[in-house]
Amino acid sequence: MLQKPWFKVFVWFMAIFFFFLAAGVVISILKPGPSEAEVMRFMMGMMNAMDNSMMGVIMNMEGRGMVASVIALSSRIAVPVMIVSLLMGFGVRLMQRRDAYAKQKEN
Amino acid sequence: MNIRFDFVVHWLYAILWALLAISGFAMVGAKYGWILNFSYATADYVHRLSAGLFVIVTLASIVYEVWRSIRNDNKYLAWHVIGRSGYQLFTFIVTLILIITGALIWICIEFNMAGIGFALFVHEYISYIALASVIWHIYMKCHALTWPKKADSRKQKA
């Protein structure tokens, strides 16, 4: 697959994209400013996003109680779920070790 | 044609990460707005949609890795995005941090402003590290960019 010409073009495109993006970020960090015009355009874009993007929808949804209660519930169960998953992980590792030991004994 | 799961996930992950990176950096601040011509709404849409797909791809990779672990399959998957050591482990940790802080920014925007500020700070600075690591990763794997030699194909045809 990697040797196919169209895929090579895709790989080149991705590599160039990331190099240009990194260059853009470096330019953004090092350039002077932000100027007043840039700030205005950025703020206007943000205001526009409130009306014409998912941002406004999400902010309206968060004002409602149901999403808030779901978030409260999920943050309450997050720690127990993490502990259970850690214990399951250790369980799997122990099982693997036991199986490896049994295989060694067989041989 | 034999297409492997880890190969597909790797390139899906690369496309999604590229979309997330360009839209995310365009929203960092006024200095960065020019990256997407100050179109915050476009950046917001692209970032949120790609983030949803990114979480699904990451979840699928984690499930695949756990399944492999349960089956005692310790074979090294060169293309897999997450793994038990090296750059795969780094990607896994960075991905989890980005997903957790991203979810905090998305969900808790009205609950805890201090928390949001901290999550934004971590999300932004981890993204710089991740972008630098992607450049390093491309540099290390630059052999993937070499074009198949024409002389070889002529020989094969003959």
Image: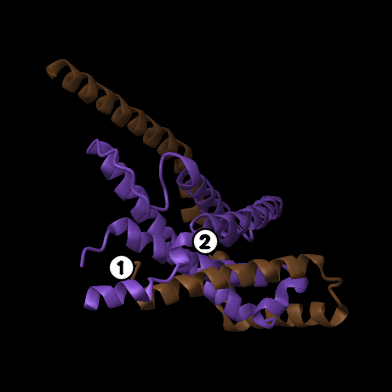
Res B111 → quadrant: bottom right
Left or right of residue B110, residue B55 in this image: left
Name the residue tied to disc 1: A1
User: In which quadrant will I find the C terminus of chain A?
Assistant: top left
How is the model colour-coded?
by chain
Residue type, label 1: Met
User: What tint does the image give chain B?
Assistant: purple
Q: Position of residue A18 (x, y in %)?
A: 57, 68
Left or right of residue A70, residue B27 in this image: right
The alpha-carbon separation of the residues under discs 2 and 1 comes to 50 Å
Q: Position of residue B12 (x, y in %)?
A: 40, 66
Does residue A76 appear anywhere in the picture?
A: no
- The mark found on residue B79 in the picture is none
Name the residue tied to disc 2: A65
Which residue shows up at 84% across the image and 73% down it? A34
Q: How many marks?
A: 2
Question: Element at badge 2?
Answer: helix
Q: Nearer the viewer, residue B108 or A85?
A: A85
Residue type, label 2: Gly
Q: Nearer the viewer, residue A31 or A36?
A: A31
User: What tint does the image give chain A?
Assistant: brown
Question: Element at badge 1?
Answer: loop
Left or right of residue B131, residue B7 in this image: left
User: On what subunit does the disc labeled 2 rest?
Assistant: A
Res A88 → quadrant: top left
Q: Position of residue A54 (x, y in %)?
A: 54, 75
